[in-house]
Image (spheres, grey):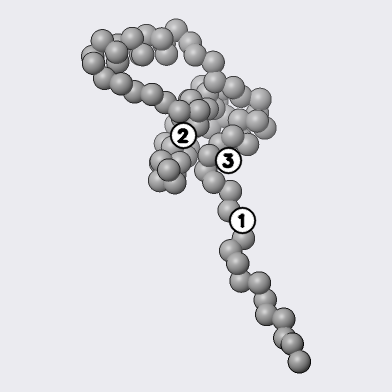
Amino acid sequence: MSVALPDRRRPSVQSTADKIRALARAHGVVYEPGPRDEWANKVTELAGDTVQLDEIELTLLALRRAGVISKPERVQLHAAYLGER
């Protein structure tokens, strides 16, 4: 006699990066660099620093600028994203 045991595997969990991509897709948001970005990059370069935002971080910036997420939501999503990297 065979008894089927319940499947105890964890359900598939969507990563924070995937949630951010989906949110941007749902709202038609795409990052486009603006004059402030160029200025900030130049100041960073002149200061001898290197800051390179990845695709997800730029998407978070675009979502915030578009008003899709609040500043606290952006910080929370960014922290969650960094915690998963």
The disc, 2 or 3, on the residue closer to the chain's N-terminal end is 3
Q: Specify the quadrant of the image occupied by residue 4.
A: bottom right
Mark drawn on residue 74: 2
The disc, 1 or 3, on the residue closer to the chain's N-terminal end is 1
| Percent x, y of residue 9 | 60, 67
Q: CA distance from mark 2 to mark 3?
A: 15 Å
User: Residue at left 53%, top 39%?
Assistant: 17
Amino acid carrying mark 1 in the image: Ser
Question: In the visual, does 19 lie left or right of 1?
Answer: left
User: Which is more foreground, mark 2 or mark 3?
Assistant: 3
Q: Secondary structure at mark 3?
A: helix
As drawn, which residue projects farthest toward the right? Answer: 1
Residue under pointer 1: 12
Q: CA distance from mark 1 to mark 3?
A: 12 Å
| Percent x, y of residue 40 | 35, 13
Count of numbered badges drawn on the protein: 3
Mark 3, other Cα within 10 Å: few <14 / some 14–19 / many ≥20? few
